Image: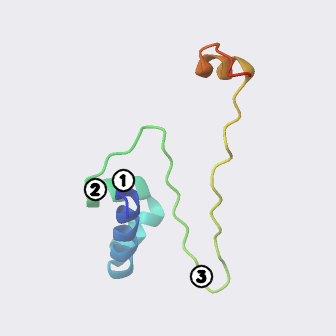
């Protein structure tokens, strides 16, 4: 299990045991996680916490893959062609 997965599991476990922590996750997740786990986050990162209930299930989708423009592809390839 990587560090991100371990942090996620720790957050879920703490939320199951600590109502104040759970409330903090729902109102200000970034500050709550930072404070409780001494973790820093990138300035523009948004964290959204959803709480499932009997009538609602949240299905997270991964981010869409980034499509690179032709010029960006040239920069990555260094202008070289691997053509045969």
Circles 2, 1 touching at the beta carbon (< 8 Å): yes
Residue at 42%, 37% in the rendered image? 43
47 displayed left or right of 34: right
| Residue 35 - label | 2
Examine the rendered structure and indicate whether residue 53 appears above or below residue 77: below
Circles 3, 1 touching at the beta carbon (< 8 Å): no
| Residue 31 - label | 1
Residue 10 x, y percent position in the rendering: 33, 69
Circles 2, 3 touching at the beta carbon (< 8 Å): no
Residue 80 x, y percent position in the rendering: 64, 15
Give the image quarter of residue 83.
top right
Residue at 59%, 22% in the rendered image? 76
- Element carrying mark 1: helix
User: Distance from label 2 to label 1 (Cα)?
Assistant: 6 Å
49 displayed left or right of 67: left
- Element carrying mark 2: helix
Residue at 48%, 44% in the rendered image? 45
Residue extending farthest bottom: 54
* Few, some or many residues within 10 Å of mark 1 (<14, 14–19, 20+): some
* Few, some or many residues within 10 Å of mark 3 (<14, 14–19, 20+): few
Q: Which residue is mark 3?
A: 53
| Residue 82 - label | none
- Element carrying mark 3: loop
Residue at 35%, 62% in the rendered image? 7
Residue 61 x, y percent position in the rendering: 65, 59
């Amino acid at each position: 299990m990587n560090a991100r997965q371990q942090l996620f599991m720790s957050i879920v476990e703490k939320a199951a045991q600590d109502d104040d922590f759970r409330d903090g996750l729902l109102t200000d997740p970034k500050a709550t996680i930072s404070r409780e786990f001494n973790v820093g986050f990138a300035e523009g990162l948004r964290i959204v916490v959803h709480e499932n209930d009997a009538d609602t299930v949240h299905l997270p989708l991964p981010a869409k893959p980034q499509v690179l423009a032709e010029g960006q592809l040239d920069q990555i390839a260094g202008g070289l062609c691997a053509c045969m």
